[in-house]
Amino acid sequence: MRTAIVSPTYNERENVEWFLRNVREQLPNAHIFIVDDNSPDGTGVEADRLTAEISEVTVVHRATKDGLGSAYRHGFDVARAAGYEMIVSMDVDRSHDPSVLPALVGAVNDGADIAIGSRYVPGGGTANWPLHRRLLSAWGNRYTAFVVGLQVHDCTSAYRAYRATALEAIDPSSTRADGYAFLTELMRRAARSGLTVAEVPIVFVDRQYGKSKMSGRIVVESMLLVTAWGVRDRLHRLKSLLARRRA
């Protein structure tokens, strides 16, 4: 399948060259879309410079920083419009190991609609995280899967490969969440569309360069949205059950 990689950036100048060279080594024929939100540190300028040395790279420049969900929506739309059959999402900050790319792509080639790089299946994990962050992530994912009714161990991993037809079915452009809630919203839609999801183990490594984009506001937003979705889905199922009993 013709494959594209979509990677949002904001202040990743120290990481973007490493990312592009390592991704190119793993997937020589994939096209890489860097979606830069006008990084003050010059990430977009550095990525533009590297296009002269590294083949099949397009830098998409956006005027403002509008959040992870917005950047992915934009990047997915660009990749789908260009006719790519498989679209991979991944971070530039070295937390997503490019050596896993062949396994993710292979899972989709083998029949999955979506393949997730998962920290919470056998063989997966995290590295260099403090205990409180490991607990927050692990229990947050368990809560999300339970409340929203997902058969997925890692709902918030951004390291994924999608068939283009899967993205068409879940329609990211009509989502509204940003931050990590956007990633959960996509999985909720995938479950409701009956898509097949595979999980490939990854070890998530905390960033060495630059500043994490995670914040308390993002965590609170995600938990509130997840809870609202869970309540809404349960009410919908209850109404459907009552309607069938009355029929």
Image (tube, rainbow, N blue to C red):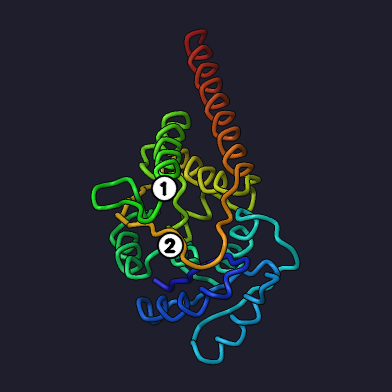
Of labels 2 and 1, earlier in sequence is: 2
Query: In the image shown, does 82 or 180 lie closer to the viewer?
Result: 180
Against 218, is 148 above or below? above
Against 118, is 221 above or below? above
Say whether marks 2 and 1 touch (CB < 8 Å). Answer: no
Task: Residue 235 in the image: state x and y as whole percent.
Answer: 55, 20
Against 188, is 126 above or below? below
Query: In the image shown, does 6 or 139 lie closer to the viewer?
Result: 139
Three-letter code, disc 2: Ser
Residue at the image point whose x is 59% and y is 65% from the top: 75
Q: Which residue is mark 2?
A: 95
Residue at the image point whose x is 43% and y is 58% from the top: 206
Query: In the image shown, does 79 or 147 lie closer to the viewer?
Result: 147
Residue at the image point whose x is 56% and y is 91% from the top: 52
Tell which residue pokes out farthest to the left in this image. Answer: 122
Residue at the image point whose x is 33% and y is 45% from the top: 120
Task: Residue 132 in the image: state x and y as whole percent.
Answer: 44, 41
Against 16, is 155 above or below? above
Three-letter code, disc 1: Pro
Mark identifier at residue 130 = 1
